[in-house]
Image (cartoon, rainbow, N blue to C red):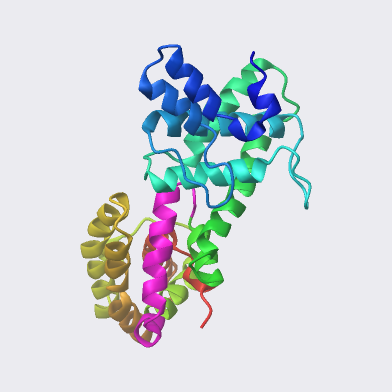
């Protein structure tokens, strides 16, 4: 109404905060009015309050999904509505405050509203695909500031829906690859597991069909480590999860040295492949180790 921000755009948020205080709004509301524009540019501070963070994310994802729903998607250098900056802002806020929310949950809240408006040109499934691709690039750019490109590719291949989690996994993996000699053996083992696991037609393992000492050892070792690994992943303790996963190294090496995976007996072969598929599922939930470059 005052046209103050129209005349002085740099006062966006500042005037709203000041007017809110003068109007007798609670301090939480006044602060959130200013903070919901943050971060306004690369390197800018993220909102410091919970209210400011929530409103900032809501405003930004509403704009992004609204634009995407009518076909306004940044291409090349064209980004008239600064959607890349707003997406990067959402990622920054979630990470800075370690918010217990996934990108999927953020997307769904906005998609539901825009679908109900009836003004979208694209289906919800199309929006989800485009949004994940768009935010994936923002997450990769964030990670690449401090993480090797191959490590970024490896951890994002396992998923980046949980921003806090993918950053934790990238840091743990970066620390591990610095000890190349020892960790490379782990990576080679897990990659070999993955290559054969792709041939599995089932993940159902029959312990009664495990006859060789080496395959029994691998099965037992994996059974011992599986639950602690899942617990560490659920707790977002990436360092511990990777340490547990690395504990399979010796058993995997012995297995491949002693056991013919592609046995003539169809049941035995399927059972061994199922064992490898189970291990590979754990491994792939952390990273696609085959993407690491030595």
Q: Which sits in the foreground, 118 or 94?
A: 94
- Asked if residue 75 can be seen in this view, the reply is yes
Count of numbered circles in the view: 0
Residue 190, x across and y down, in percent: 41, 73
- Asked if residue 199 can be seen in this view, the reply is no
Residue shown at 41% from the left, 82% from the top? 184
Dominant SS type (magenta):
helix
Q: Is residue 28 left or right of residue 3?
A: left
173 in relation to 87, above or below: below
Is residue 26 rendered magenta in the image?
Answer: no
Q: Is residue 241 left or right of residue 281?
A: left
Is residue 175 rendered magenta in the image?
Answer: yes
144 in relation to 99, above or below: below
The stretch in magenta equals 159-185
Q: Is residue 171 left or right of residue 63?
A: left
Q: Which sits in the foreground, 195 or 86?
A: 86
Q: Which sits in the foreground, 20 or 44?
A: 20
Residue shown at 27% from the left, 56% from the top? 232
Residue 16, x across and y down, in percent: 53, 23
User: Where, quadrant-wise, is the N terminus in this rendering?
Assistant: top right
Residue 110, x across and y down, in percent: 57, 27
Residue 227, x across and y down, in percent: 24, 56
194 in relation to 103, above or below: below
Q: Is residue 294 left or right of residue 209?
A: right
217 in relation to 71, above or below: below
Residue shown at 59% from the left, 46% from the top? 41
């Amino acid at each position: 109404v005052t046209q103050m921000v129209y005349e002085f755009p740099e006062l966006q948020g500042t005037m709203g905060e000041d007017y809110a205080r003068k109007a007798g709004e609670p301090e939480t509301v006044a602060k959130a009015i200013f903070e919901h524009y943050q971060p306004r540019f690369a390197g800018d501070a993220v909102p410091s309050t919970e209210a400011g963070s929530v409103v900032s994310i809501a405003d930004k994802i509403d704009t992004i999904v609204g634009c995407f729903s009518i076909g306004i998607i940044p291409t090349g250098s064209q980004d008239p509505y600064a959607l890349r900056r707003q997406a990067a802002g959402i990622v920054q806020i979630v990470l800075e405050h370690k918010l217990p929310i996934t990108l999927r949950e953020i997307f769904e809240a906005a998609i539901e509203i825009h679908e109900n408006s009836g003004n979208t040109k694209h289906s919800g499934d199309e929006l989800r695909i485009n949004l994940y691709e768009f935010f994936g690039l923002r997450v990769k750019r964030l990670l690449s500031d401090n993480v090797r490109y191959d490590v970024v590719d490896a951890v994002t291949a396992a998923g980046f829906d949980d921003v806090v989690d993918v950053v934790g996994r990238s840091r743990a993996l970066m620390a591990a690859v610095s000890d190349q000699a020892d960790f490379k053996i782990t990576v080679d083992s897990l990659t070999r597991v993955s290559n054969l696991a792709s041939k599995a037609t089932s993940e159902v393992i029959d312990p009664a069909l495990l006859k060789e000492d080496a395959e029994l050892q691998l099965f037992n070792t994996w059974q011992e480590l599986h639950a602690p690994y899942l617990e560490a992943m659920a707790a977002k303790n990436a360092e511990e999860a990777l340490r547990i996963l690395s504990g399979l190294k010796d058993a995997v090496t012995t297995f491949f040295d002693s056991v013919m995976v592609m046995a003539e007996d169809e049941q035995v072969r399927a059972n061994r492949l199922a064992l490898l598929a189970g291990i590979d599922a754990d491994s792939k939930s952390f990273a696609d180790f085959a993407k690491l470059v030595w």
